[in-house]
Image (cartoon, helix red, strand yellow):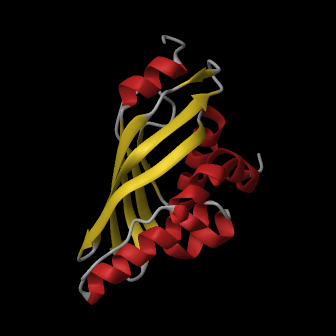
Amino acid sequence: MNRRRLMKTSIGAALALILAQQVGAQDMDETSQASFDTVMAFMAAMNEGVDAMSPLMADDMVWHNEGDTTLPWIGETKGKDAIFEFLGVFGANVQTTKWENTDAFASGDTVAVFGVMDGITPHSGQEIGTFSFALRAKVRNGQIVLWHWFEDSFAVSQAYHGRS
């Protein structure tokens, strides 16, 4: 399985939109700004693949997706290699067609991003419909240590299971 191709295919187009959004930080202290910049750089790096993402990830990074545990990408994944495998699973199951960050801010080592998404689940072929998401990320020494993702898993699950 070509992880780089899977990630670019599944996440690439949508994540490229992230940087196009005018979500900016205002009047942050140095630590908050550095954390914010790291998270935004990581989002951009997802569009570029493993080589761009890896330096922005701590070896002990945790990626946690909240939601319906019948979806194959929900739960906690620890460590870079496991996260890259997880992203392949995610990419095989969700094709993002819309991604808009609406708010983002940082306080110290914590960054919060909120927005809306849409996508298609190849499992059923159904469009998910626009749904909201929230992200809580933590940064240590210029690297992501936590990526805690929250989405409307009801809408995503309904589409994935073909229950529109």
Residue located at (58% from left, 48% from top): 87
Q: Is residue 73 left or right of residue 96?
A: left
Q: Nearer the viewer, residue 41 or 83?
A: 41
Is residue 56 depicted above or below 164 in this figure? below
Q: Is residue 70 visible?
A: no
Residue located at (76% from left, 52% from top): 5
- Residue sticking out furthest to the front: 22
Instruction: Give x and y (percent) for residue 28.
Output: 25, 82
Instruction: Give x and y (percent) for residue 119.
Output: 56, 34
Q: Is residue 14 visible?
A: yes
- Residue sticking out furthest to the top: 163
Q: Nearer the viewer, residue 21 or 9?
A: 21
Is residue 155 depicted above or below 31 in this figure? above
Q: How many marks?
A: 0
Instruction: Give x and y (percent) for residue 8.
Output: 70, 53
- Residue sticking out furthest to the bottom: 30
Residue located at (23% from left, 77% from top): 108
Q: Nearer the viewer, residue 53 or 34?
A: 34
Residue located at (33% from left, 63% from top): 104
The image quarter containing residue 48 is bottom right
Instruction: Give x and y (percent) for residue 145.
Output: 38, 67
- Position of the N terminus, as image quadrant, is top right
